[in-house]
Image (cartoon, rainbow, N blue to C red):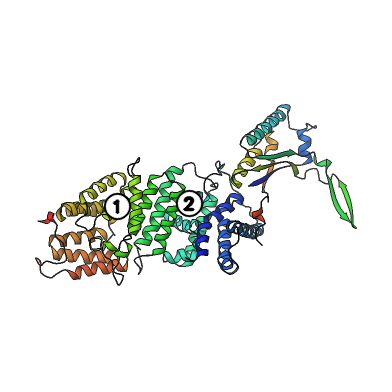
Amino acid sequence: MPPTEDLLRELAPRVLGAVVRRYGHFDTAEDAAQEALLAAATQWPRDGVPDNPLGWLVTVASRRLTDLLRNEQARQRREDTVARWTRTSAAADSTTDDTLILLFLCCHPALSPASQIALTLRAVGGLTTAEIARAFLVPEATMTRRITRAKKAVKDSGTPFAMPADHASRLGAVLHVLYLVFTEGYAATSGPDLHRLELSAEAIRLTRILHRLLPADQEVIGLLALMLLTDARRPARTGPVGELVPLEEQDRSRWHADAIAEGIALISDALPRGATGPYQLQAAIAAVHAEAATTEDTDWPQIVALYEVLMRVSDGPVVALNHAVAVAMARGPRAGLALLDEVAADERLAADHRPLAVRAHLLERLGDLDAARAAYLAAADLATSLPRQRYLNTRAARLPDRPGHEGVGRRDAGDM
Amino acid sequence: MKYMILALASQVDYDALVGKPGSAWTAEDFAALRRFMTDLNEDLTESGELVETRGLAAPVHSRRLRLRDGVPVVTDGPYAETEEVLAGYWIVECASFDRATEIAARIVDGPGPDSDRENYVVDVRPLVDSADDHLAD
């Protein structure tokens, strides 16, 4: 990122926060702040960065807000409507960081997760609507409508610019949005590119900010560690032509050592303290993987144990699926397949390729190659991303024709 | 950031407040209003948000000046009896527009005869008070 862009992205939520604090009008203020950022992006590289960049942006955004409000009010008068709203709860809060307040506003319970994500990326992340639309592969007009509706919903809710009274219980929604942004970037659910780097990097950047603002929160630490440990594998996760490389075949020397060290340090520090939430547990699992030189060296019983704790705190079929994989690694494919039948029956996974892909892997390891081939091909049909479809079809094609032949499937001690 | 909270009233409201014939304001109403204002100002002083508060004399005492043929000309008592004009103000320094609005909401919900309360009008306006309002060109 050029230095100006870096600075602007960092200042974006603070500009919006300052303007909304002073003048209200969350929806219009957001437009005004974006216009100020746009003006800075063109003027600063040419004329130099002003002495007080934040002050400059707040001033320009405030003036723009005045213009936008006058236009709105003139239109409302023509239409003979007056903006009326009912004030809600207390807001005597000057100590909380504006960026944190904005995160909670953008993850407002009145919004759908898709809208929360879009609004967070724009209002807190400082991305333009066009950039967000591109990242989520939707037309810009669609994203504009989504963001406009989301901003209006936040404004119409009358929520004051302050930390919500129930912020502890709403932090989960904020973390979930950041996690979804990260996973959308890491494992693109659709489209030709497996990694949409900017979204993952943006999620990490925003989670770092959240960690700085709430340094004692264990789940924020867990989420940041999870993102760092997962993202560290990125260089090894795709092959030379962009194909997907599974964890067991990854060249671990290509993992980002710095990110792994930081992630492990964060989670090691957090785990001994207090209640353990789902993000910390997932980070702990990622840390166990990161600490092993190979799949064989991995402490699978430890991973199984962590998944069992995780299943008690979060009721997700994907967690149960991963648990089945870990059990297969610790105790052999038969044990994994036995669990898989139960997991695959969960209707939340009905259209998901992952149970079939896992079944295919386990059948391959058992040596049941015809069944493995059928499962790989069926999984490929359900997969939505092209790299994943290619990976699964390639696995099917790589299987030898005759059972008994030593193929790519590995055999564990548990198989014998 | 600083905000001015303006309470508006007409000459008719002032007359009612001082108990002119036809006024709905009883002695109890008036006492309640005084208590309300004292409590409010004490709370705002306590929270550190009050910069200044003042009440204005009845509109009839106003003078309006205009230039006529280059000479300032004074009009005494320029307002119609029912015209809402500034009656009192608070300058508060607080966390946000929303907090200033909350204080204003307490003021507009002040005591008085029910027949009058629905006519109360309070405005909140951000003050231009710092360099960042003027910084950029």
Same chain for labels 2 and 1? Say yes or no: yes
Q: What chain does badge 2 belong to?
A: A
Residue annotated with mark 1: A287
Left or right: where does residue A8 sit relative to residue B29?
left
* Amino acid type, mark 2: Leu
Q: Is residue A277 visible?
A: no
Left or right: where does residue A402 sit relative to residue A102?
left
| Residue that extends furthest to the top in the rendered view of this protein | B28
Residue for point 65% across, 46% down = B2
Label at residue A222: none
Query: Vertically, is A166 above or below A303?
Result: above
Q: Secondary structure at mark 2?
A: helix
Residue for point 35% across, 41% down = A273
Q: Residue A362 occupies which quadrant of the picture?
A: bottom left
Q: Residue A93 occupies which quadrant of the picture?
A: top right
Residue A217 is situated, as x and y percent measured from the top left of the image, at: 41, 44
* Amino acid type, mark 1: Ala
Q: Give the Cα separation between the discs numbered 2 and 1.
A: 28 Å
Is the residue marked by circle 1 packed among few (<14), some (14-19), or many (20+) residues within 10 Å? many
Residue B7 is situated, as x and y percent measured from the top left of the image, at: 71, 42
Q: Secondary structure at mark 1?
A: helix
Is the residue marked by circle 2 packed among few (<14), some (14-19), or many (20+) residues within 10 Å? many
Left or right: where does residue A110 sit relative to residue B7?
left
Residue for point 79% across, 36% down = B15
Residue A285 is situated, as x and y percent measured from the top left of the image, at: 28, 51
Instruction: Mark 2 or mark 1: name the one nearer the start of the chain.
Output: 2
Residue annotated with mark 2: A103
Left or right: where does residue A288 sit relative to residue A92?
left
Pick the residue in front: A287 or B87. A287
Query: Vertically, is B120 above or below A68?
Result: above
Q: Please report contact status of discs 2 and 1: CB closer than 8 Å, yes or no.
A: no
